[in-house]
Image (cartoon, helix red, strand yellow):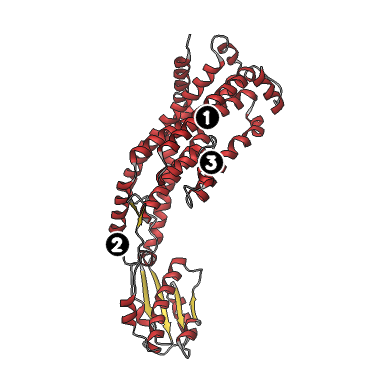
């Protein structure tokens, strides 16, 4: 008789009715949203702070470039002659943010080497970067004029280059397309990695608990080991999906409520206004949003969604069977450490290959080969697919992955069959190989 549905139901209900599971399901989003809220609030408080920077321009070249912007105010010390020491004393007495001193030198090159920012504490990196950008731009223009170069003609002669990307079949892409593909592939690979780590360990602990409580001896008398193992894997996986869905729904609801009630945007880390100005290079945020919308339309969303589900589920089941086998082989979590490294290493290798190889060359030899190796293909292939992988490669990789899963389940079931009845002895790799031969 097939007891698999009953085992799946039992495992699922046992997990979702567990008090610690329920508490962590609802407490985790609360903790994360609270943490993000504190960070966003502190960031907002920091950005609301008004910074008054005094400028002592002895060269008389750049004082007019400093214009109040956002929460950064400039106090130009040029009405009356003032020494550097007097300027320092004035800024200290008024609790100013700092003093920018531009020394008087012979030429522009010398002036650029004698610019100092004085402050009581270390200044913000964004403030210093913005000041350097302003000063460099102005001194460069002055240097052009001193050499008889027409600045207006230089500005008018500047050319922006945006290379169009198109394959030989006529399909166009862009840098924004590549960035969006990178985000999707990286998120998919990282999500699978974390899901395997979190819920794979949950399966392993569940097997160890039943083994140590000796309840497994009663269950195994009427249920085949492979059915019991698959039931645990599928039941725990469904519980994990339920928990993850609650996290997303409840977390999104909490994020909306916190944003409305406290007036704090949890997605806004708001860097200094000057840095935004430098980075944007004159382009509006709406311009970049439009580019990303166009990039999203050009992506094969149906292929991405289907491939994500198939590789995600198959990869998770493959590693879950290994976690279940380890749980059956040991008596406590301490003994699992010697067997965890062979499982974790392929996952870590897959993530590193995805980050350092797939991003740079998604169709290269290394990326292609590791997208077919079953222990790395769930992560590597998910990161390659957004860049355009032929369907036959996706199908072949999936077939190899599923075939490996079936083989691993068969091997894990043999380990499970013997291991769940073994007590009081730490297993070795040699003994586990013997169990597989039984």
Q: Nearer the viewer, mark 1 or mark 2?
A: 1
Q: CA distance from mark 2 to mark 3?
A: 40 Å
Question: Which quadrant of the figure contains the C terminus?
Answer: top right
Q: Position of residue 144 (x, y in %)?
A: 39, 84
Which residue is depicted at the point 33% across and 73% down? 68
Closer to us: 240 or 352: 352
**Can you tell which mark lies on residue 318?**
1
Q: Is residue 232 above or below residue 69?
A: above
N-term-proximal mark, 2 vs 3: 2
To which quarter of the image does residue 330 belong?
top right
**Residue 284 got which mark?**
2
Which of 146/294 is in front? 294
Residue 11 rendering spot, x and y as whole percentages: 48, 21
Determine the residue positioned at 50% across, 43% down: 368
Where does label 3 land, which residue?
370
**Picture coordinates of residue 14 (x, y %)?**
47, 21
| First of labels 3, 1 by sequence position | 1
């Amino acid at each position: 008789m097939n007891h698999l549905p009953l085992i799946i139901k039992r495992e699922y209900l046992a997990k979702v009715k567990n008090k610690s599971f329920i508490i962590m399901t609802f407490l985790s989003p609360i903790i994360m949203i609270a943490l993000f809220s504190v960070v966003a609030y502190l960031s907002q408080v920091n950005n609301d702070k008004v910074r008054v920077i005094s400028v002592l321009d002895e060269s008389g070249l750049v004082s007019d470039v400093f214009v109040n912007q956002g929460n950064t105010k400039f106090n130009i010390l040029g009405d009356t002659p003032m020494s550097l020491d007097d300027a320092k004393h004035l800024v200290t007495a008024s609790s100013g943010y700092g003093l920018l001193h531009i020394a008087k030198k012979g030429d522009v090159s010398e002036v650029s080497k004698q610019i100092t920012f004085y402050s009581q504490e270390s200044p913000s990196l964004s403030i210093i970067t913005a000041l350097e950008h302003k000063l460099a731009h102005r001194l460069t223009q002055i240097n052009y004029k001193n050499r008889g170069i027409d600045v207006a003609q230089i500005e008018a002669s500047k050319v922006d280059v945006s290379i169009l990307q198109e394959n030989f079949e006529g399909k166009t892409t862009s840098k924004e397309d590549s960035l969006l593909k990178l985000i999707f592939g990286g998120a998919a690979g990282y999500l699978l990695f974390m899901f395997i780590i979190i819920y794979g360990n949950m399966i392993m602990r569940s097997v160890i608990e039943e083994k140590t409580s000796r309840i497994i001896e009663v269950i195994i008398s009427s249920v085949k080991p492979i059915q019991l193992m698959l039931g645990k894997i599928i039941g725990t996986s469904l519980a994990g999906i339920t928990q993850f869905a609650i996290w997303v729904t409840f977390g999104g609801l909490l994020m909306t409520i916190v944003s409305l009630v406290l007036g704090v945007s949890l997605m806004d880390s708001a860097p200094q206004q000057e840095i935004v100005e430098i980075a944007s290079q004159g382009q509006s945020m709406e311009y970049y949003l439009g580019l990303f919308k166009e990039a999203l339309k050009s992506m094969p969303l149906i292929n991405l969604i289907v491939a994500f589900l198939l590789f995600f589920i198959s990869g998770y089941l493959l590693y879950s069977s290994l976690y279940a086998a380890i749980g059956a082989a040991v008596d406590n979590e301490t003994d699992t450490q010697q067997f965890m490294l062979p499982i974790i290493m392929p996952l870590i290798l897959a993530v590193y290959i995805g980050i350092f190889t797939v991003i740079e060359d998604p169709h290269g030899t290394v990326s292609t080969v590791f997208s077919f190796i079953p222990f790395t293909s769930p992560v590597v292939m998910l990161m390659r697919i957004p860049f355009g992988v032929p369907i036959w490669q996706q199908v072949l990789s999936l077939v190899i992955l599923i075939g490996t899963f079936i083989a691993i389940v068969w091997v894990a079931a043999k380990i499970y069959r013997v291991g769940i009845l073994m007590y009081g002895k730490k297993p070795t790799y040699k003994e586990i190989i013997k169990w597989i031969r039984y």
